[in-house]
Image: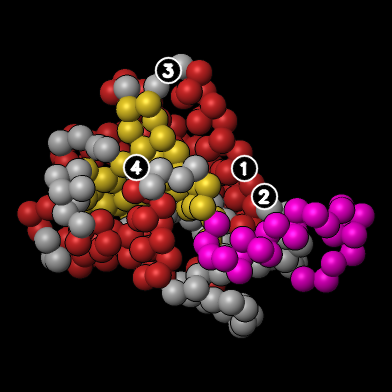
Amino acid sequence: MKGKKAIIVGASSGIGMEVAKVLLSDGWQLGIAARREDKLLELKAMAPERIKVMAIDVTQPDAGERLLCLIDELGGMDLYFHASGIGRQNRNLKADIELRTMETNAVGFTRMIGTAYRYFAQRGEGHIASITSIAGTKGLGPAPAYSATKALQATYLQALEQQSRQSGLRIRFTDIRPGFVDTALLNGDFKYPMLLQPSAVARDIVGSIYKRRHVRIIDLRYRILTFFWRLIPNWLWRRFRL
């Protein structure tokens, strides 16, 4: 993988940062982006000659153009990895939380994935990988917008994969669906079960990209959990207390 070029949006913390570290150790050249440029500069210090940095807010209309500028600075792109996202429990259905989640995880996601897809379509090949979530398996009452946007993301990637194949493009897709990961995204009073460590999740993600997996649920416990979730009928799921 030495000399390969990857863009990571959402690299300033959590899984995005850990994936950047793994790819860097494997010899990749990186373009890293997030809203917080200061954190990106800390990552760049690890290998300044192999990392390009750009501040990108996926909710802004110019985010796609800024991604293309970062690709130009890097000198191309073989892999686009989307790790940008937000999520909170919202049992009181506060409007600002729901709308911010939709703006980032739905509109922002579509903007960035679409830009990467069009770039690869012109090139004829490439690889798009994105963190969705097991939360998209069922509608989760404690986090309505989060689970809805994660279902949207998974469906969108599946649709683009079908479109790519029908168009004769060699664009590969990897839909990463982690369980609960011990990152700032889950900070709060609620204690989440079966927490995964970001570094282990990042290694699994990079391995899944190398193996060209279409969908990867991390880890085995969550693969078993989501298998049984899908079997629960809607009339029973409505009565679940989460």
Q: Amino acid at mark 4?
A: Tyr
Write the residue at 85% across / 67% down: 240
Q: Amino acid at mark 1?
A: Leu
Label 4 sits on a secondary structure element that is strand
Q: Which residue is mark 3?
A: 168
Observer-nearest of 219 and 148? 219
Write the residue at 20% across / 57% down: 26
Verify CB contact (< 8 Å) between mark 1 and mark 2: yes
Q: Amino acid at mark 3?
A: Gly
**Image quadrant in which you'd find residue 38:** bottom left
Q: Range of the magenta residues?
A: 217-242
Marks 1 and 2, Cα distance to the nearest angstrom?
6 Å
Q: Which residue is mark 1?
A: 152
Sequence-first disc among 4 and 3: 4
Outermost residue to the top: 167
Write the residue at 64% across / 58% down: 135
Sequence-first disc among 2 and 4: 4
